[in-house]
Image: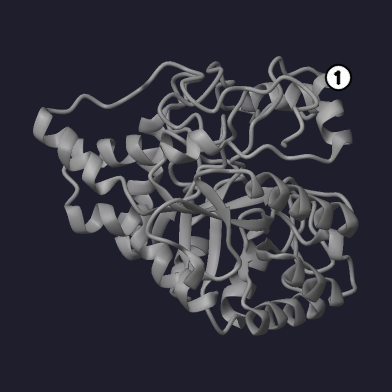
Amino acid sequence: MTAPPVVPLATDVDRVPAHTPPLSAAQRDRSARLARDAVSLHDHPVRLPDPLTPESWAALADSGRQYVGDAGLARSGLAAVFASKLAGGTLDEALAYADALTASLATARHAYRAVAWSEVRETGTAVFAALEDLGPVGTDLSGLDTLYAKGFRSAGLAYNAGSALAGGLGEATDGGLTALGRDAVRRMAELGMVVDVAHVGDVSTVDTARYATGPVVISHAGARAVWPTPRMKPDDVLRAVADTDGLIGIEAAPGSTRSRRDGGGHTLDDAMHHLEYCAALVGVQHVALGPDTFFGDHLGLYDAAGWPRPAVPGLPDLDAEYVAGMENPGEAVGNTAAWLVAHGWSDTDITAALGGNARRVLGAVL
């Protein structure tokens, strides 16, 4: 029998009002057909506490448990999702996260644990463990083998502040991919782990793309030309990753993929502007989804965990409480499909962006 949650949890179905692009009946049918078998390169498909306070967040963290949003995933259209551990922490904490994810999936009706692409089924959602950054490994690359044995199949080389492997996007100076970083990229390729550069600095990302022998992935970001912040990627970085036959996963964390400098909004429309820009720049075959969403109050998590809310000097402050249309893993795929249908994308290109491109790359890596 499953133990009750340690704190009340957010619902993973209909937590916020639906935000669906207006479509004709024929377009709705087409959108529903296309919003299947999708892949998310980066998400947090777990339920957050509700209410989300410093106390409830601390209680959940101290419990060491994860609660996969199984009902939400059942509605999502996702065939596979990479469930990422939040950045930082120790190697033991990363391993404990994988164990907690596995335990939650053991009682799920729809979602299931996967460690190889060949395990992705025709029904249900395969959940792969992922790591936001390899800081927990430090300078001992044997930790990569330990992570792989525990089921991790994707990992970022660094977070914003950098690591022993690569510079981070938040550093004033990015020294590039280190010798240890090159060894890590090589070992990840040998093991069959996705090399993720979402939070890696620009110089280090280009270095990684030059050194890698296989696809490199930006699991969750957008285009700096659309929204000029360090979190977004400049054109040369986007091209470098695409040149590895890699992927650019478009994210929708609150405040990330904005596009309007005359206000503080952030909706599905903004995220889609990033997707369209990247597709035009490097080709549809290199874009994918990496929404970076939770089942719960994402902005509330910043406050509960004591993290600063996203803000960039010279740009309007975010005034939205959530990203309408891409608020959670359950709605992102369907609403993206609807938006692309409404904006004239072909079935072939929609299928590629929602999952076909990811299947090509992940099938080769995993």
Height in image: 147 above or below 233? below
**Hey, what amino acid is under mark 1?**
Glu
In depth, the one of 324 and 96 nearer the eye is 96
Percent across and percent down for residue 357 are 37, 64
The residue carrying mark 1 is: 55
Q: Quadrant of residue 332?
A: top left
Residue 172 appears in the rendering: no
Q: Identify the residue at horizontal 57%, vertical 42% (top origin).
A: 292
Q: Identify the residue at horizontal 77%, vertical 32% (top origin).
A: 3
Q: Identify the residue at horizontal 80%, vertical 80% (top origin).
A: 179
Give the colour scheme shown. one colour
Percent across and percent down for residue 315 are 56, 27
The answer to whether 109 appears left or right of 324 in the picture is right
The answer to whether 353 appears left or right of 362 in the picture is left
- Quadrant position of the C terminus in the picture: bottom right
In depth, the one of 146 and 299 nearer the eye is 146
Q: Secondary structure at mark 1?
A: helix
The answer to whether 182 appears left or right of 353 in the picture is right
Q: Identify the residue at horizontal 68%, vertical 44% (top origin).
A: 104
In depth, the one of 176 and 215 nearer the eye is 215
